[in-house]
Amino acid sequence: MKLRYITDIDKIAQIPADQREKLKQVSKKYAFRLNDYYLGLINWDDPNDPIRNLVIPQENELSDWGDLDASNEKDVTRVPGLQHKYPHTALLLCNEVCGAYCRYCFRKRLFMNDNDEAVLDVSEGLKYIAETPRITNVLLTGGDPLLLSTKRLRYILESLRAIPHVQIIRIGSKMPAFNPWRILDDPDLQALLRECSTKDKRIYLMAHFDHPRELTPQAIEGIDCFIRNGVICCNQCPVLRGINDDSEVLAELFRKLSFIGCPPYYLFQGRPTAGNEPFAVPIIRGYELFEEAKRHVSGLAKRLRFVMSHETGKIEIVGVDSLFMYLCYHRAKDPANEGRFMIFHRDDNAVWLDDLRPVLPERVAGMLGASQRLASDAAGTAIEREHAHTATSVGPE
């Protein structure tokens, strides 16, 4: 199926003319693009429609908030188009175009003028990977790799498969949501996936469904096509205000994804990227939604983690109580931080790690001491009860 792409707000008649003029100012700064298939998923009778919020600009995207590179990805760029932050994983930014532009994108800087972080010539990145034996995982990202021609994808995938230490190739893509016919109508792409996703070296599709309404029959058929051609599928998405910041919506999304063989992998805390203030959800709120959603799904869907991709690493939000927030490095840029457990004062307004106030080490020591005393007291009480029970039940005959 051939889709028609729209890059001009004026082409969307459902938006009133006066609003289009205002939104054009937003699209001048942050790229706008979608297609007629995805446009057809919008309920224009609902001014708060989540699909609309995903792709149609909003005036408050121009607020002075956030940073274009909120996780300082430039600091881990080793050669043009290649990021290497964690020892075993490299990111190859091989495209600077997407099927549509999510308004909350954390890499919107790639789609702005004079940005050269994503490259079409990936030869330097491939050379870096080949010369770095500890890299076993390569993530193709951008932009959307599946917008590249199949011929171009063949060159990249075959080049990676020729590197002995590269075991896993991941393809980060929202094309299954934006245009499932990219896989359904391309037998050459299907053949390529079968060739390069082998029984001992798999290709993973890191799909990106943000809302259950994106899981149309066509999208589900697209996921099935990936699976039938040897690709392992999973999903990752951020929690987003006005899109999926509802535990029932998240639970429905997680359930459906697990049903179709594309189980949820990560739920991300949205990065404080410039233009993304309309979508910001406080960490506490995100954690509560995450935990409530997990109550309504099976074990396969419960495997996902709630994390934030901070400059210093991938940090998991482990728990929250009335006073504190408990976080842990799931992956760390600095090996010394790997697995590090952290305690912060509870802050219901914080949206990022940098907003949080750590509990001082001496306070942590005091808390641990108190918890140990409580545990000791509890153990002592249990022993006393056990002795009392024994004395009663083994009395004189």
Image: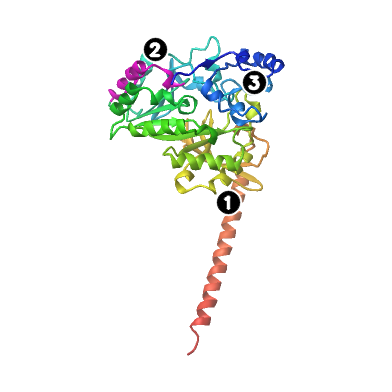
Q: Secondary structure at mark 3?
A: loop
What range of the chain is rendered magenta? 144-163
Residue at left offset 48%, top offset 40%: 256
Taking the view exactly as shown, the residue that stands out farthest to the right is 18
Where 2 falls versus 197 (above or below)? Answer: above
User: Which-is-in-front pick, marks 2 and 1?
Assistant: 2
**Residue 84 versus residue 185: which sits nearer the camera?**
185
Quadrant in the rendering for residue 308: top right
The answer to if 162 sits in the magenta stretch is yes
Task: Report the amino acid beneath label 1.
Answer: Leu
In the rendered image, residue 161 lying in the magenta stretch gets the answer yes
Foreground residue among 333 and 95: 95
Q: Which residue is mark 1?
A: 368
Magenta region, main secondary structure:
helix
Q: In this rendering, which labeled residue sits more in front, label 1 or label 3?
A: 3
Residue 131 shows up from this direction: no
Which is nearer the eye, 23 or 125? 23
Task: Tell me the residue at 69%/13% (across/down).
Answer: 21
Relative side of 102 to 154, left or right: right
Residue bearing the label numbered 2: 121
Q: How is the image coloured?
A: rainbow
- Relative to residue 245, is residue 121 drawn left or right? left
- Residue type, numbered disc 3: Gln
Q: Position of residue 188 (x, y in %)?
A: 32, 21
